[in-house]
Amino acid sequence: MTRIITSEDVARQAGVSTATVDRVMNGRAGVRPATAERVLQAVEMLGYVRDTRASSLSRRNKRKIWVFLPDSNTSFRAALSEEIEAAAMEFARSCDLVDVQAYMAFEPEDLVRSLKSVERDSCDGVILVATDDDDVRSSINRISDMGIPVVTLVSDSPRAGRAHYVGIDNIAAGRTAGRLMGRFLIDDRRPVALVCGSFLVRDHVERRLGFEQLMHKDFPQVPILPALEGFDDPAKMEQVVGALLQAHPDLGGLYSIGAGNRGAIQAFANTGRGDVVFITHELTDLSREAIRNGIIDAVIHQDPGHEVRSAFRLLQAELDGTPIRWEQERIRIEIFVKDNLP
């Protein structure tokens, strides 16, 4: 008896996932032309005839989604983890399995090592907090070329072959911080300091760019000190911010672009400085209390729950070939000060 050729045979021959075969056979978007051509060549060579009943049943099979997060010990990272756990339970009801894996924060080499484990036979979709690094881009392209859709979360790698990015417009967020800083300082000409988590992650780089562009254009009288790195580590942030306050007794403002603000808050407490405008990101229990106590002046926030749910919805749309409601997926920039804390 002649064996029936299946979509798994086509996927194996073309070097892609069965989800990609399904998208090509149904004429859905999200597949690179070269990848689609390999699938069609495999279909012709093997003489594959699509069984619509079997295809319907195959969509009920469990699909595996891999999520890659940095292992930083921050409140925002903890919030992302909680939201991913909640989303995993929700998507488990639609027959998806979610595997969360940690990599060393701000270490592109470790993320690349982690992504090497992604293969078409063990993974159907990837969500990751990306580092904008050449090797990371190559890893994302390798995964995408196998027909596995990739969604970047919070931090993007836009030149890679990812399907979607979920997060705020970080240049706009940086410009927002600059506008707030300039307005808080009014006619003050004291210098302003910036502390990034890392110069390697795109969201921090873009926030810095937006901040500096806005300040140079609209508040050119305010000097901006060279940016520093705090690596989202509270101990490092305490050291960096403490040194800034000591070296610049005339410091007028601090824009903390990343996390680790527990250390920055402690540095202010150690010095007793209350005359510095302090703007940062992400509303957490810690930053909320610091706003109430007059240490932090404003927080620029992104909703981690919205971002995680959006990432899963977009990935599921890629896998199922269903329409996307773009108005639902837009991540908004929120501003919190003492007067509007939730």
Image (tube, rainbow, N blue to C red):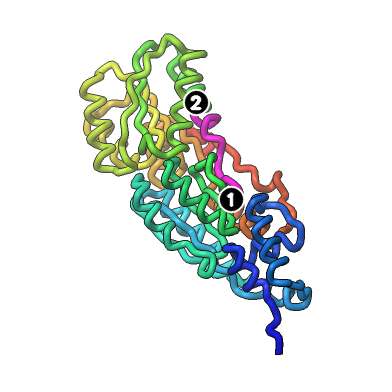
Q: Which residue is mark 2?
A: 210
Q: Secondary structure at mark 1?
A: helix
Measured as percent of width and height from the top left, residue 75 is found at 40, 49
Answer with the quarter of the image where residue 242 lies. top left
Measured as percent of width and height from the top left, residue 171 is found at 52, 30
Answer with the quarter of the image where residue 278 lies. top left
- What quarter of the picture does the N terminus occupy? bottom right
Camera-nearest residue between 102 and 90 = 102
Camera-nearest residue between 274 and 126 = 126
Q: Are marks 1 and 2 in contact (CB under 8 Å)?
A: no
295 relative to 81 in the view: left or right: left
Which region is colored magenta?
A: 163-174
Measured as percent of width and height from the top left, residue 91 is found at 60, 66
Q: Inspect the magenta stretch and tell me whether residue 168 lies in it.
A: yes
182 relative to 57 in the view: left or right: left
Can residue 85 be seen here? The reply is: no
65 relative to 204 in the view: left or right: right
Q: Residues within 10 Å of mark 1 (few under 14, many from 20)?
A: some
Q: Amino acid at mark 1?
A: His
Residue at the image position 60 percent from the left and 58 percent from the top: 147
Residue at the image position 35 percent from the left and 49 percent from the top: 109
Q: Residues within 10 Å of mark 2 (few under 14, many from 20)?
A: many
Residue at the image position 31 percent from the left and 19 percent from the top: 251
What's the CA distance linking mark 1 and mark 2?
23 Å
Number of numbered labels in the structure image:
2
